[in-house]
Amino acid sequence: METRVNFPQKEKKNRGKRVERVFEVGATLECGQCFRWERGEQGYTGIAFGRRLHIWEEGDEIIFDSTPEDFENIWYKYFDLGTDYEAIREELCRAHPKLREMAEFAPGIRILRQESWETLVTFLLSQNNNIPRIKGIVRRLCEGYGSPMEGGFRFPPAERVAELSEEALKEIGSGFRAKYIQAAARMAADGEIDLNAVSTMELGEAREKLQTIPGVGPKVAECILLYGMHRMEAFPMDVWMKRAMEEFFPGERPEVFGEYAGIAQQYIYHYSRLHKERFRG
DNA sequence: GCCCAGGTATAAA
DNA sequence: TTTATACATGGG
């Protein structure tokens, strides 16, 4: 069963034939915020919240190969379809004109609402690692220890991961990060950290709490807040972001972007990766 | 084979 | 408080 959702392309006034997309599937799923989506011959396939989805673009339409129930209950929220990104982007670009040039490379990028536990684990794996390899480790973790479901495996819950030995976690290729995953799982399973509670804490308090998890530093904490708890004011800052910030917004702090700093960050990050050579130092 | 990866913990300056 | 180094591994 398919759910067809129309996202009309809009002619942007005063800018010739440039179009504004409010949802670009590829940019959204390949901008380094998620690790369980695979590109196929047509579109992408992935699993989240125990459901599998095949999604692709057809002209102005986004096709969700799912039941209407799953679309309403899961994917609508997962892809944050209730948020008006076009309005936010316009507001951000008006306040920060230099951002406009960068945002134009991925105007339809969206911040996913991923599961917080999965986000914690995948970004623990991200440290000093690369995206293809992170995806491989996550896939082996799910295939080995996630409960089987139609067309794949669920992401294993903290209680399940907490049972695994450090050796078992190394066997899937996590390397020195195995001990971090194990500690995080135990903390989450024991209730030493309540991710649900953290998601609603005041931002500074939430950052502090997340960084009590071994292996979670300022960057990973920010990724968990933005991608796994939908705190839009969070601003993950890696080496590429720092260079891009220095060039486009010298002397500025992430806070200048306000309550939607996370979206601004995503435009800047995407741009800096498309222009690697420029920011290679 | 070599280089590097959406960083962090730890030690040293 | 700032700066340097190890870390496990395999994709490119």
Image (tube, coloured by chain):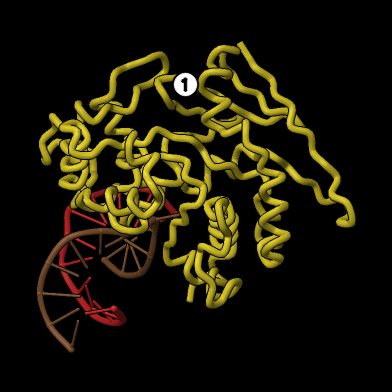
Chain colours: A yellow, B brown, C red
User: In terms of depth relative to the viewer, which is nearer, A65 or A182?
Assistant: A182
Quadrant where the N terminus of chain A sits is: top right
> Which residue position holds label 1?
A52
Which chain contains the residue that carries disc 1? A
User: In terms of depth relative to the viewer, which is nearer, A255 or A42?
Assistant: A255
Determine the residue located farthest toward the front in the rendered image: A202
Q: Position of residue A57 (x, y in %)?
A: 68, 31
Q: Position of residue A263 (x, y in %)?
A: 57, 51
User: In terms of depth relative to the viewer, which is nearer, A90 or A3?
Assistant: A90
Q: Indicate the amino acid at tag 1.
A: Arg
Q: Is residue A4 left or right of residue A229?
A: right
Q: How many marks?
A: 1
Residue A9 visible in image: yes
Picture quadrant of residue A274: bottom right
User: In terms of depth relative to the viewer, which is nearer, A167 or A266?
Assistant: A266
Identify which residue is drawn at 67% across, 64% down. Answer: A96
Label 1: few (<14), some (14–19) or many (≥20) C-alpha neighbours in 10 Å: many
Q: Position of residue A66 (x, y in %)?
A: 56, 16
Q: Position of residue A185 (x, y in %)?
A: 20, 36
Residue A171 visible in image: no
Identify which residue is drawn at 70% across, 24% down. Answer: A5
Picture quadrant of residue A54: top right
Identify which residue is drawn at 12% across, 41% down. Answer: A166
Q: Is residue A149 left or right of residue A264?
A: left
Identify which residue is drawn at 52% across, 18% down. Answer: A73
In this rendering, the answer to whether A12 lies above or below A83 is: below
Q: Is residue A163 left or right of residue A90?
A: left
Tag 1's secondary structure?
strand
